[in-house]
């Protein structure tokens, strides 16, 4: 094996660039490429125009179980699994492609206003794949719609009903308020951002918050 | 069962026929474009497996036209499943999550079918 292939390095830089553009944290890049920390940090500054955020990654498994995050992550994971198994894009390439498709879908039909970061951040999406690889989470199949949704590993599959077929009683509240507000001509954007403060918090700050976020 | 009398079936009028052919051709051209832009994402969007994707990508314009000029649609309805469609028809939370639901079900279903 050659020690350092320039072509491979170029490939990795390209991959890292794509990931940074999608909002990856430095830890993700370090895990997915063999580039040095210094080079990655430099690349990050070049693309984002600011230093990479410090601090730990969001590590909570429970976040994926809360209502809206669960739906978004299930959408992402379905896409990822398709891309990873059936197309030539594998592993980290599949992650990039699937995340692009997910954020496109989130902007198109899942209520995330364009320009805002979708509910599931790139770093969280990467964490999710790691959780699946280490068997911390599983796909449980809803007995009504037969769709696979993310659940804790070893949770009983029998009688599982998904977050869309049986939303928690509180779930629609803020959302319907937002829809009602959007129906009125007065500044629907302002209301939308207010109800979704979670997604406008800068990534760096959000990373520290490993606790459960509101169910939207 | 259904009464079947030979020779009575009314022929589709010309405009419907040319609409079908137009949709066919647009579909094939769109498929090629999606695959050319981004092979992997295109496969996901179209629900193709890689063998089909390769063939479609390699079709010449003349072949596209030939394939498209039939009296049937060559693209299928991907939600062609009674249970799936009736689930999607339910009005949960004013329909905001319908797209999320269909994305999950469709991606996983074609996953199972192709596997």
Image: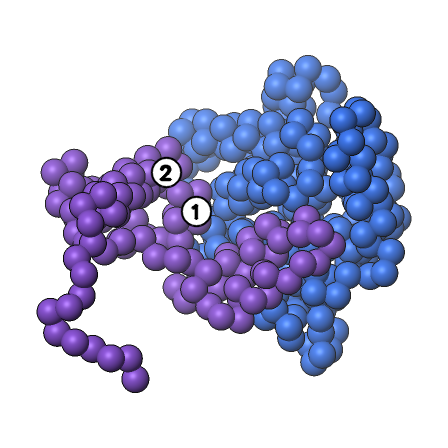
Chain colours: A blue, B purple
Question: Which residue is disc 2 drawn over?
Answer: B34
Query: Does residue A126 appear left or right of residue A5 in this picture?
Result: right
Chain to which mark 1 belongs: B
Q: Residue at x 72, y 42 (%)?
A: A119
Seen at 46% across and 60% down, the residue is B79
Q: A153 above or below A60?
A: below
**Residue A183, placed above or below residue A211:** above
Mark 1 vs mark 2: same chain?
yes
Q: Residue at x 16, y 36 (%)?
A: B61
Give SS at disc 2. Answer: helix
Image x and y of residue A203, in percent: 77, 32
Can residue A99 be seen in this snapshot?
A: no
Residue A192 pos. (x, y %): 79, 33
Question: Can the viewer see residue A6 in this picture?
Answer: yes
Q: Quadrant of the N terminus of chain A?
A: top left
Q: Which tag, 1 or 2, sits closer to the chain's start?
A: 2
Q: Which residue in the structure is indicated by mark 1?
A: B45
The 10 Å Cα crowd at callout 2, few under 14, some 14 to 19, many 20 or more, is some
Residue A65 or residue A45, whichever sits in front: A65
């Amino acid at each position: 094996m050659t020690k350092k292939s320039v072509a491979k390095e170029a490939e990795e830089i390209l991959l890292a660039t794509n990931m940074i553009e999608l909002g990856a944290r430095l830890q993700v890049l370090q895990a997915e490429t063999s580039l040095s920390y210094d080079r990655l940090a430099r690349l990050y500054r070049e693309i984002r125009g600011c230093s990479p955020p410090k601090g730990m990654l969001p590590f909570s498994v429970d976040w994926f179980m809360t209502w809206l995050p669960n739906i978004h992550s299930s959408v992402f994971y379905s896409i990822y699994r398709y891309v990873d198994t059936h197309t030539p894009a594998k592993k980290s390439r599949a992650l990039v492609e699937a995340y692009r498709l997910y954020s496109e879908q989130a902007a198109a039909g899942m209520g995330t206003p364009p320009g805002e970061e979708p509910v599931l951040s790139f770093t969280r999406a990467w964490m999710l794949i790691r959780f699946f690889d280490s068997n911390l989470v599983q796909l449980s199949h809803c007995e009504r719609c037969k769709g696979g949704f993310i659940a804790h590993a070893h949770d009983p599959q029998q009688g599982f009903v998904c977050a869309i077929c049986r939303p928690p009683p509180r779930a629609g509240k803020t959302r319907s308020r937002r829809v009602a507000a959007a129906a009125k001509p007065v500044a629907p954007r302002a209301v939308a951002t207010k109800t979704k403060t979670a997604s406008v918090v800068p990534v760096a700050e959000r990373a520290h918050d490993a606790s459960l976020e509101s169910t939207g | 069962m259904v009464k079947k009398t030979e020779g009575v079936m009314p022929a589709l009028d010309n405009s419907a026929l040319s609409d079908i052919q137009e949709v066919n051709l647009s579909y094939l051209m769109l498929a090629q474009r999606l695959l050319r832009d981004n092979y992997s994402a295109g496969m996901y969007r179209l629900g193709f497996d890689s063998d089909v994707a390769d063939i479609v990508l390699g079709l010449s314009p003349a072949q596209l036209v030939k394939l498209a000029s039939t009296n049937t649609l060559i693209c299928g309805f991907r939600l062609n499943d009674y249970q799936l469609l009736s689930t999607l028809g339910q009005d949960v939370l004013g329909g905001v999550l319908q797209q999320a639901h269909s994305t999950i079900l469709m991606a996983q279903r074609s996953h199972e079918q192709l596997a």
